[in-house]
Amino acid sequence: MADIRSIELIELGDLQSRLYDWQIDNFGAMDSFNLALGVYEETGELAHAVLKRSQGIRGYDDLGKAADAIADALADAAIYALNLASSRGHNIRSIALREKPRQGGAEYYLTEITGRAASIVEYRGGGSLIPVFLADLAEYAESENIDFKEALFTTAEKVMQRDWNKNKTDGGDGSRPCFDEDRAIVCPQCVNAEHGVRRIQDVVGDVLGDMREAMKQDG
């Protein structure tokens, strides 16, 4: 078709295979529903970063931080999508993009991404959902001036360095040292650690920020 350009990611097939091997080593053969939830979770992270940037809060008025968060979420969503494809026996060798951007630009693509993520959960990534979702991610990345391929491959390499069997907190990459974000506690072994104190302060700050925003909207 004249309005389609194909981005051949030569290493994509190899990356998909390596990611799936890493997933099996760390989490076993996850079912398609949970992998689809991973796609949905990371799509939520993308929406979060875009929203907070538009609101200028949570530090996302720093456009560099916002761009990094958006690139990371795009890559993580793609990683889950690739693993979901692998679980269904699908090999993704290329991503077909439209020759010209759709009208509506970034907002259009973000709408497509969020809607497609919900469909991936509903249908477990069946049919052409995953290739089209990956294309949406790549086209949205272009609208944000983000190199999608670079973001994907760089993030994937970092992800595959993690060993969740040895370290259930952060996979051993130091991103969440001795900290349980769900319960907002530091482990007993380093309860006085400076990094732990900072992380708790961050969580409390986020909660207070949410409360202030809610109070503004209510009154």
Image: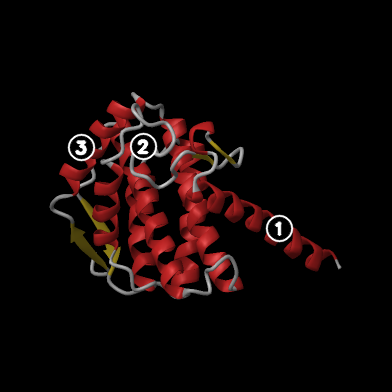
Q: Earlier in the sequence, mark 2 or mark 1?
A: 2
Instruction: State how many labels appear.
Output: 3
Q: Residue furthest left?
A: 10
Picture coordinates of residue 78 (x, y %)? 35, 49
Element under label 1?
Answer: helix
Kindly report the distance in space between the C-alpha atoms of the residues bearing marks 1 and 3.
43 Å
> Mark 2 highlights which residue?
171
Callout 1 crowding tier (Cα within 10 Å): few <14, some 14–19, many ≥20: few
Q: Residue at x 20, y 37 (%)?
A: 17
Packing grade of label 3 (10 A; few <14, some 14-19, many >=20) is: some
Label 2–label 1 contact, CB within 8 A: no
Residue 4 location, quadrant: bottom left
Residue under numbered circle 1: 208
Earlier-in-chain disc, 3 versus 2: 3
Instruction: Measuring from the top left, give residue 206's x and y in whole percent.
Output: 63, 57
Q: From what the image shows, is residue 15 above or below residue 29?
A: below
Q: In the picture provided, is 90 more to the left or to the right than 33? A: left
Name of the residue lying farthest toward the top: 28
Could you tell me the amino acid type at mark 1?
Leu
Find numbered disc 2 in the image and state the secondary structure of the residue it sits on. Answer: loop
Query: Viewer-proximal residue, 187 or 71?
Result: 187
SS at circle 3:
helix
Dot 2: few (<14), some (14–19), or many (≥20) neighbours within 10 Å?
some
Residue at the spot 40% in from the left edge and 49% down from the top edge: 77
Q: What amino acid is labelled 2 in the image? A: Gly
Q: Is residue 115 visible?
A: no
Tag 3 or tag 1, which sits nearer the N-term?
3
**Quarter of the image holding residue 142?**
bottom left
Determine whether label 3 and label 2 are within 8 Å by CB.
Answer: no
Q: Which mark is residue 17?
A: 3
As drawn, is 137 to the left or to the right of 115? left
Quadrant of the snapshot with the C terminus: bottom right
